[in-house]
Image (cartoon, helix red, strand yellow):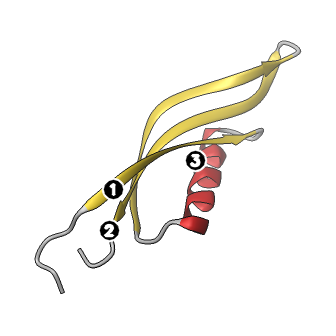
Amino acid sequence: MSDHHAYKKVEIVGSSKIGTDDAIRNAIAECNKSLRNLDWFEVVETRGHISNGEVGHFQVTLKVGFRLDDS
């Protein structure tokens, strides 16, 4: 076991018709399909899509951190 860790961050945008919490969960679930060792996330932007004068989708930009293999 290593006495240090190295991490990488990626940026991803999640969306949801329900709300920002659901958008975060959707983004993390998609990341989990292709990345290993997910450790943390940071919300860096919240925005939305307006359709016919109403909120169509909530959009949340996340930075997701994961530990590199063997670190």
Q: Residue 68 carries which label?
A: 2
Amino acid carrying mark 3 in the image: Ile
SS at circle 3: helix
Q: Do the residues labelled 1 and 2 touch (CB within 8 Å)?
A: yes
Amino acid carrying mark 1 in the image: Lys
Q: Dot 3 corresponds to which residue?
A: 24
Query: Would you call the spot at circle 1 few (<14 residues within 10 Å), some (14-19), or many (20 or more)?
Result: few
Residue 53 position within the rendered picture, expressed as x and y whole percent measured from the top left: 83, 12
Depth order, front residue of 22/27: 27
Query: Would you call the spot at circle 2 few (<14 residues within 10 Å), some (14-19), or many (20 or more)?
Result: some
Residue shown at the point (57%, 36%) measured from the top left: 60
Residue shown at the point (11%, 77%) measured from the top left: 3
Q: Which of pointers 1 and 3 lies earlier in the amino acid sequence?
A: 1
Q: Which of pointers 1 and 2 lies earlier in the amino acid sequence?
A: 1
Residue 26 position within the rendered picture, expressed as x and y whole percent measured from the top left: 65, 53
Q: Which mark is residue 45?
A: none
Q: How many numbered marks, from 0 up?
A: 3
Quadrant where the image shows the N terminus = bottom left
Residue 34 position within the rendered picture, expressed as x and y whole percent measured from the top left: 57, 66
Query: Would you call the spot at circle 3 few (<14 residues within 10 Å), some (14-19), or many (20 or more)?
Result: many
Depth order, front residue of 28/4: 4
Outermost residue, bottom side: 1
Q: How far apart are marks 2 and 3 (CA)?
A: 22 Å
Q: In this view, does 49 lie above or below 44?
A: above
Q: Distance between the residues labelled 1 and 3?
A: 19 Å
Residue shown at the point (33%, 75%) measured from the top left: 69
Amino acid carrying mark 2 in the image: Leu
Q: Residue 8 carries which label?
A: 1
